[in-house]
Amino acid sequence: MVEQAAGRPYGEFLAEHVFAPLEMGSTTTGRPAGDDVAGEPPGPGAGDVWSTVGDLARYHERIHSGPLLNGESRAVMAGPLAPTAEEPRAGRAFFAGHYGYGVFVGTVGGHRAYFHPGDVPGFASFAAWLPERRASVVLLTDDEHADVHAVTRRLLAAAGLS
């Protein structure tokens, strides 16, 4: 949809309208040079954004409080679109909320948060913005089985936010 609406490739649009304004100099789209992972590459928007912890922390802070989106757009993004489908499981109530437009809205470790987990074969990620604390939590790992709940708990505790 982005390519059709913008009349240009998805990666070019993101580079100019998202990555550059948010100063995400270590973020790109598409398969990295020299990547020899077998299988089909992900399509645009489906795991093809490559980033760093620093760029993702900047993204979360600036997308929720910076000039890229106006207040009306932020309200729409964070509005309740659908309840999360995940059934409560022991140890999993740490993340709770509903899904907005591209972001979960709810709580992380008891703090109001905007967050999103992610995974592609071989990798897992989690990123959250805690607006009252003006703090980001970002986890990137090359272990698709990593317990992002447990690691996020430890990160919040280490930052004095548990």
Image (cartoon, rainbow, N blue to C red):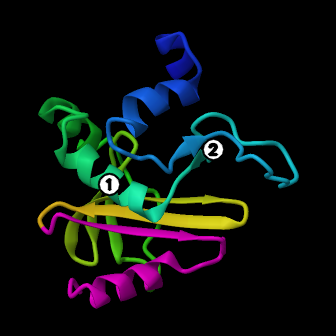
- Residue bearing mark 1: 58
Q: In the visual, does 73 lie left or right of 30?
A: left
Residue visible at 43% across and 73% down in the picture: 88
Residue 3 % position (x, y): 55, 18
Q: Secondary structure at mark 2?
A: loop
Bounds of the magenta segment: 133-162
- Please tell me which residue lies in front, 57 or 4: 57
Q: Secondary structure at mark 1?
A: helix
Q: Is residue 150 magenta?
A: yes
Residue 53 % position (x, y): 45, 64
Q: Is residue 91 magenta?
A: no
Q: Is residue 6 above or below residue 139?
A: above
Residue 113 % position (x, y): 25, 62
Residue 60 in sight from this viewpoint:
yes
Q: Hey, which quadrant is residue 124 in on the image?
A: bottom right
Q: Residues within 10 Å of mark 2 (few under 14, many from 20)?
A: some
Q: In the visual, does 41 lie left or right of 65?
A: right
The residue type indicated by label 2 comes to Asp
Q: Hey, which quadrant is residue 10 in on the image?
A: top right
The residue type indicated by label 1 comes to Arg
Residue 50 % position (x, y): 58, 50
The image quadrant where one finds the C terminus is bottom left
Residue 1 in sight from this viewpoint:
no
Residue visible at 57% across and 38% down in the picture: 45
Q: Which mark is residue 48?
A: 2
Question: Does the residue at mark 2 contact the one at mark 1 (Cβ under 8 Å)?
Answer: no
Q: Is residue 132 above or below residue 37?
A: below
